Amino acid sequence: MSFYDELVWRGLIKDETSPELKDKLNKGGISFYIGADPTAESLHIGQFPTFLMIERLKRAGHIPYILVGGATGRVGDPRGTGEREKADIAVIDRNFVKIKAQMKKLFGDDVTIVNNFDWFKDMNYIDFLRDVGKYINVNYMINKDLVKRQLEIGISYAEFSYMLIQGYDFLKLNEKYGITLQFGGSDQWGNLTTGIELIRKLKDEEVYAFSMPLTTDSNGNKLGKSYGNALWLDKEKTSSYELFQYMLNFEDIMMEDYLKRFTFLKKEEIENIMKEHLACPEKRIAQKALAKEVITFLHGLEEYNKAARISECLFSGEINKLSIEEIKDGLKDVPNFEFKLNESILDILVNNNIAVSKREGREFLSNGSITVNGNKVTDETLVVNEDILIEKEYLIIRKGKKKYFIGTSLK
């Protein structure tokens, strides 16, 4: 396959502005950019396939630029679902530094990162209306999908003007760096084409854009922070283990699509993975392959191996093979409790609502449903002292195959 044909096969191109783009993408040498507003400290998993396009284009011989929107982040783009909160400027500036560092880590020092605040901070409002607003028709703006949707519930002038700002960004980058291609998510299509319109009218030059499908689940819900299910690409905000578990639970029906969009695996490799996966879906072969590719790209192979090991040990109950830091990472969201030393295991179960009564506690113990720090316990008279604890402090109880509890001793 040609580079362009591969992008189509992976489902990575939704709209494009010109049939010429196919040959230009195959040839290489295009200076391109993508933008991100620093409204958070990190990109999230829903944005990953879109930003991974930077690496795909780099490998195909194109020249990368990333615009982190210190100016546009102050305004906010229409979402089609309601007005954004007014951004805190100090937070935007702080996030810019973090997003810039993240982009350098992921895509290397050969990526040029720019801030559109640099050319907007001294711009006169009247000049902006004359030099930009004069060339973009209001009817053109209100016919863009997100604007049209948000008009029904109300849109501020600031968010309505967002596409003018992004259009001007493309013009400035074209003038300063010779950039002729912009891409982004399909919800950005109106903003992408505004820049093309502005450059055509002011410079009589053809530039290009394409959009990418948004990453969604099978119900069409975005995998993004606006929907409350964000997993961050910064491992300090979302650990590799959390990312591993999240992807392990991806729907089978979405796996071929995700493997195409989230990875560099070749067509034959993906077909083989899906063949094995469909033969034994309970083994989550496709999900594990996806997790390995994504986590390795983001954080390195060692982080993937660590995440997979934590998952396997927690599933098998062999937590004595893990450090307390790994245990805490893997059991971040499980119930916590405190206990007194030298209590019996039965009293600890009942006092901390792991069992509702001593009778139920005895049943759990007698039928082998309770493990303590990785060891099965059947003796209800077992006294929990420092010798049993992990690092003389922690008591990890597993009830059944999946239910974990973390206890900390009271000194």
Image: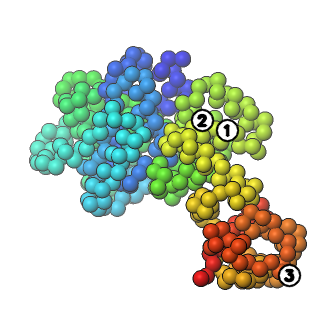
Q: Assign the C terminus to one quadrant of the image.
A: bottom right
Label pair 2/1, CB-CB below 8 angstroms: yes
Which of the two marks, 3 or 2, is nearer to us in this view? 3
Judge from the rendering whether residue 50 lies leftward or rightward of residue 130; answer left or right.
right
Residue 58 lies, in percent from the top left, at 40, 27
Q: Which residue is mark 2?
A: 259
Residue type at mark 1? Ala
Q: Which mark is residue 359?
A: 3
| Residue found 59% across the figure and 35% down from its top | 259
Asked which quadrant contains residue 170, the reply is top left
Image quadrant in which the N terminus is located: top right
Q: Amino acid at mark 3?
A: Arg
Q: Residue furthest front?
A: 387
Few, some or many C-alpha atoms within 10 Å of disc 3 (few <14, some 14-19, many ≥20)?
A: few
Please, what secondary structure does the residue beneath circle 2 have? helix
Please give left or right for residue 150 compared with residue 323 in the image: left
Specify whether 62 is left or right of 162.
right
Q: Nearer the viewer, residue 91 or 122?
A: 91
Q: Which residue is mark 1?
A: 286
Residue density around tag 1, few if under 14, some if 14–19, many if 20 or more, within 10 Å: many
Q: Residue at x 34, y 35 (%)?
A: 109
Mark nearer the N terminus (3 vs 1): 1
In the image, residue 187 lies at what x, y percent?
A: 42, 42
Q: What residue do we see at 85% from left, 81% from top? A: 359
